[in-house]
Image: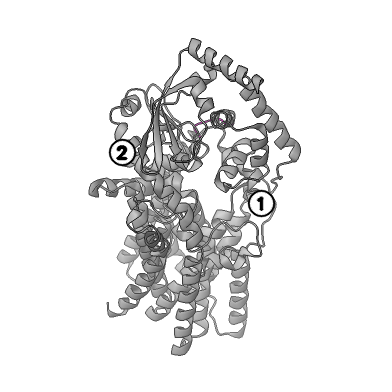
C-alpha cells in the first residue's frame, strides 16, 4: 500500500494539468463568471446538450437541438448518443443527485477524467512491470505525450493543417474522458486472468474483464473496437508463444465471450435502428486501401523492431508475458487502421490515432524500456518527470488565452439562456415535449454561439439546429433549408453566403457548420475520409444561387414550417430585425445580461403581405 503513494502524486499532477484550462478561464472571468465550462473540443457542446436533456428527465432518444423527444406519437430513431448511453447516464444521474448542471458536470469531468486515467494506467503498468516508480513515471510520459504520439498537439501545429487536438486529447468530454480509463482496466484484468496462479482469482478477473468490455461497448465505439483489436492480437500471440497456457486462455475467452456476445448482439440491434443516412453523416468510407503511416503505427513498428532485436540477442524471452503484452500493444494500431482491408469499411480512423492507439503504444514503449533496463538511474527518472511535466504545462496552457476569449463570449450568454430555461416552465415547452415529443417553442439568434450553447442550458428548440446531424434525426436537405432560413432572417445577402462558403468570415465555427451542412463534413475536413474531395468554386456558386432562389420565394407558408417564439440578440449590436419583422410581431425586448430577449408572434397573412409590399416599395424608391 505504501508504494501507491506514487500513484497519488502523479494522479494529483495530472488532475492539476487537466484543470488548468478551466482555472485559467476562471481567472479571466473572475466575479463575472456565469458558470460556463471551458471548451476543449467543439463536439463537447453536443455531449453536454445530451447530458442536459437527460438531467432534465428526457428520454434516451432525444434531439436537444431541434427540441424533440422520442414519443409514441412521434418516435425518434436511435443515434450514436442514445446507443453509447452509459457515460451520459452516469453523468446525468450523478448531476441530478447533487443538483449540478451539465456545465458543472463537465468542469468536474476534467478533474475526474485526469484522476481515473492516471489511476488506471498506473495500475496496468504497476502489475505488468512490477515497479511502482516506473508506473508513476510512465503515467506522466503516456498522458503528457499522448498528443504527440497521435500526430497532434503543439509540436505538429506548424507542420500539419489538420491539427484539431491540443492539450490532453483523452480529456475530451464526455467521450472518451469518462470511459477512457476502463480500456486500461480491461487490459489489467486480462493480465490478472492470464497470469494469476490462483484459478478462482483468475476466473473472477476474467468475469470482471468481461463486464468492463460490456461497459465499453455501450460507452464509445472507438474504445470497444480498439479493445477487440488488442485482445485479438494478444490471443494470437499467447496461443503461439505460450502453448502450455492455452487452457487458461480458453477460460478467459469463454468468460469474456459469455458476456461480450450478448452485449454485441444488443448493440447490433440498436445499430439497426439508426437512420439510413448514418453513413453519410458519420463519413463511412468504403475502401480497402491500407493505412500504414500513422504516428501510432510508426511507434508500434519501433517497439516491434526493438523486441525482435532483444529476442535475437537473448536479452528478452519471447514467451515472457510482459513481452507478449508489449507486442500486442504495438500491433493493435495496425489492426484498427487496416481492418478495412478485410471489411471494406472505414469510419473516421483518426479517432483511433488521437484518442486511444497513441496512448496504447506509449504504454508498450514504457514496458519495453522497463524490460531492457531493469534499473533506471534516479537522475534519469527525475529528468523524465520534469520533462513530462514541463511539456504538459506548455501543451495545456499555451492555447488557454485564445480559448478563453471564445469561452468568455459563451459565458456572457448564460444569463439569457437561464432565463429561457425558467420560461420553459410556462411557455409550453415542457408541455409540448411531454404531450407530443416536440417543443412548441423555437429560438432564433443571429449569434451563432447562442445556437451552439442553448441546448446545454435550456430545453427550447433552435431554428438553426446545430446538433441535428450528429443526432441523425434530420435529412441533409432539411438541415440545409433551415440554414437558409436562418440566413434569411439574419438578412444575409448572396454575397455574404458566398464569402462564408469561401472561408472569408470571422466566425470559423459558423463557417464549418454551414459548409458541412451543405456539402458534408468530409468535404470540409478532408482527413475524415480517404477519398474526400475539396469543395469546388462551381459548387459554392450553385449553392449561392440556391440561397438566392430561397429568399426570393420565401412566404408565410415557409415561416409556418418553423414558427419562432423567441429572438436573442447581443445588446448594443443593433441587429437589423427587418426580415423578422416582416413575418413576426416583436415585443420591446428584455435585456438579460449582455443580451436582449424578444418574444415573437407570427403575423396574420394580411398584415404580413402589407408589410412585404411596403418593404418592396421602400426598396424600389431607394
| Quarter residue 32 falls in | bottom left
Q: Residue at horizontal 48%, vertical 33%?
A: 273
- Quadrant that contains the N terminus: bottom left
- Residue identifier under label 1: 341
- Residue identifier under label 2: 56
Disc 2: CA contacts within 10 A as few (<14), some (14-19) or many (>=20) = some
Q: Residue at horizontal 53%, vertical 83%?
A: 372
Single out the residue that lies furthest toward the top.
606
Single out the residue that lies furthest toward the front.
621
Disc 1: CA contacts within 10 A as few (<14), some (14-19) or many (>=20) = some
Q: Position of residue 341 (x, y in %)?
A: 66, 51
* Vertical position of residue 130 compared to residue 211: above or below: below
Q: CA distance from mark 2 to mark 1?
A: 44 Å
Q: Nearer the viewer, residue 444 or 91?
A: 444
Q: Position of residue 620 (x, y in %)?
A: 66, 20
Q: Is residue 261 visible?
A: no
| Quarter residue 540 falls in | top right
* Vertical position of residue 104 compared to residue 20: above or below: above
Circle 2: element type: loop
Residue 555 lies in the magenta-colored region: no
Q: Nearer the viewer, residue 98 or 224?
A: 98
Q: Nearer the viewer, residue 339 or 355?
A: 355
Segment tinted magenta in the rendering: 472-476
Single out the residue that lies furthest toward the left.
98
Q: Main secondary structure of the magenta part?
A: loop
* Vertical position of residue 388 compared to residue 290: above or below: below
Circle 1: element type: helix
Compared across the picture, whether 571 is left or right of 549 comes to left
Q: Position of residue 7 (x, y in %)?
A: 35, 74
Q: Is residue 162 visible?
A: yes
Residue 571: mark: none
Which mark sits nearer the N-terminus, 2 or 1? Answer: 2
Amino acid at each position: 500500500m505504501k508504494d501507491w503513494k506514487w500513484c497519488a502524486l502523479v494522479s494529483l499532477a495530472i488532475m492539476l494539468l487537466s484543470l488548468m484550462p478551466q482555472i485559467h478561464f476562471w481567472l479571466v472571468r473572475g466575479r463575472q463568471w456565469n458558470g460556463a465550462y471551458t471548451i476543449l473540443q467543439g463536439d463537447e457542446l453536443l455531449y453536454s446538450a445530451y447530458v442536459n436533456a437527460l438531467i432534465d428527465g428526457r428520454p434516451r432518444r432525444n434531439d436537444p437541438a431541434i427540441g424533440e423527444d422520442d414519443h409514441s406519437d412521434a418516435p425518434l430513431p436511435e443515434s450514436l448518443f442514445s446507443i453509447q448511453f452509459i457515460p451520459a447516464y452516469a453523468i446525468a444521474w450523478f448531476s441530478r443527485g447533487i443538483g449540478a448542471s451539465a456545465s458543472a458536470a463537465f468542469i468536474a469531468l476534467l478533474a475526474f477524467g485526469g484522476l481515473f486515467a492516471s489511476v488506471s494506467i498506473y495500475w496496468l503498468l504497476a502489475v505488468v512491470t512490477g515497479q511502482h516508480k516506473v508506473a508513476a513515471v510512465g503515467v506522466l510520459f503516456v498522458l503528457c505525450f499522448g498528443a504527440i504520439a497521435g500526430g497532434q498537439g503543439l509540436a505538429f501545429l506548424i507542420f500539419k493543417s489538420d491539427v484539431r487536438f491540443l492539450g490532453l486529447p483523452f480529456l475530451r468530454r464526455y467521450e472518451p474522458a469518462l470511459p477512457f480509463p476502463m480500456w486500461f482496466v480491461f487490459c489489467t484484468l486480462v493480465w490478472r486472468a492470464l497470469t494469476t496462479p490462483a484459478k478462482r482469482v483468475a476466473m473472477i478477473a476474467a468475469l470482471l474483464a468481461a463486464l468492463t468490455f460490456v461497459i465499453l461497448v455501450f460507452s464509445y465505439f472507438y474504445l470497444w473496437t480498439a479493445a477487440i483489436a488488442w485482445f485479438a492480437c494478444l490471443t494470437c500471440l499467447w496461443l503461439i508463444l505460450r502453448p502450455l497456457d492455452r487452457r487458461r486462455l480458453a477460460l478467459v475467452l469463454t468468460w469474456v465471450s459469455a458476456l461480450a456476445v450478448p452485449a454485441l448482439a444488443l448493440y447490433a440491434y440498436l445499430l439497426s435502428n439508426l437512420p439510413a443516412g448514418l453513413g453519410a453523416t458519420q463519413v463511412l468510407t468504403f475502401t480497402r486501401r491500407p493505412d500504414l503511416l500513422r504516428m501510432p503505427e510508426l511507434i508500434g513498428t519501433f517497439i516491434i523492431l526493438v523486441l525482435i532485436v532483444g529476442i535475437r540477442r537473448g536479452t528478452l524471452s519471447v514467451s515472457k508475458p510482459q513481452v507478449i503484452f508489449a507486442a500486442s500493444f504495438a500491433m493493435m494500431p495496425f489492426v484498427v487502421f487496416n481492418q478495412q482491408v478485410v471489411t471494406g469499411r472505414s469510419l473516421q480512423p483518426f479517432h483511433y490515432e488521437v484518442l486511444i492507439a497513441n496512448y496504447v503504444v506509449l504504454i508498450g514503449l514504457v514496458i519495453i524500456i522497463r524490460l531492457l533496463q531493469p534499473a533506471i538511474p534516479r537522475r534519469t527518472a527525475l529528468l523524465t518527470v520534469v520533462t513530462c511535466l514541463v511539456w504538459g504545462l506548455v501543451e495545456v496552457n499555451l492555447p488557454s488565452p485564445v480559448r478563453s476569449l471564445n469561452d468568455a463570449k459563451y459565458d456572457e450568454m448564460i444569463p439569457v439562456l437561464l432565463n429561457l430555461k425558467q420560461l420553459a416552465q410556462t411557455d409550453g415547452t415542457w408541455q409540448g415535449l411531454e404531450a407530443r415529443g416536440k417543443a412548441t417553442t423555437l429560438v432564433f439568434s443571429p449569434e451563432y454561439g447562442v445556437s451552439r450553447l442553448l441546448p446545454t442550458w435550456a430545453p427550447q428548440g433552435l431554428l438553426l439546429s446545430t446538433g441535428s446531424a450528429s443526432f441523425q434525426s434530420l435529412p441533409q436537405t432539411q438541415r440545409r433549408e433551415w440554414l437558409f432560413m436562418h440566413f434569411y432572417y439574419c438578412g444575409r445577402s448572396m454575397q455574404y453566403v458566398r464569402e462564408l462558403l469561401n472561408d472569408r468570415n470571422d466566425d470559423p465555427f459558423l463557417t464549418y457548420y454551414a459548409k458541412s451542412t451543405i456539402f458534408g463534413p468530409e468535404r470540409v475536413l478532408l482527413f475524415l475520409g480517404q477519398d474526400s474531395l475539396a469543395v469546388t468554386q462551381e459548387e459554392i456558386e450553385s449553392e449561392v444561387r440556391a440561397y438566392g432562389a430561397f429568399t426570393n420565394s420565401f412566404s408565410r407558408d415557409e415561416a409556418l414550417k418553423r414558427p419562432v417564439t423567441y429572438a436573442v440578440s447581443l445588446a448594443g449590436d443593433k441587429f437589423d430585425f427587418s426580415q423578422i419583422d416582416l413575418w413576426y410581431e416583436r415585443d420591446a425586448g428584455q435585456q438579460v445580461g449582455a443580451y436582449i430577449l424578444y418574444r415573437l408572434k407570427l403575423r396574420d397573412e394580411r398584415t404580413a403581405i402589407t408589410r412585404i409590399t411596403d418593404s418592396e416599395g421602400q426598396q424600389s424608391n431607394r
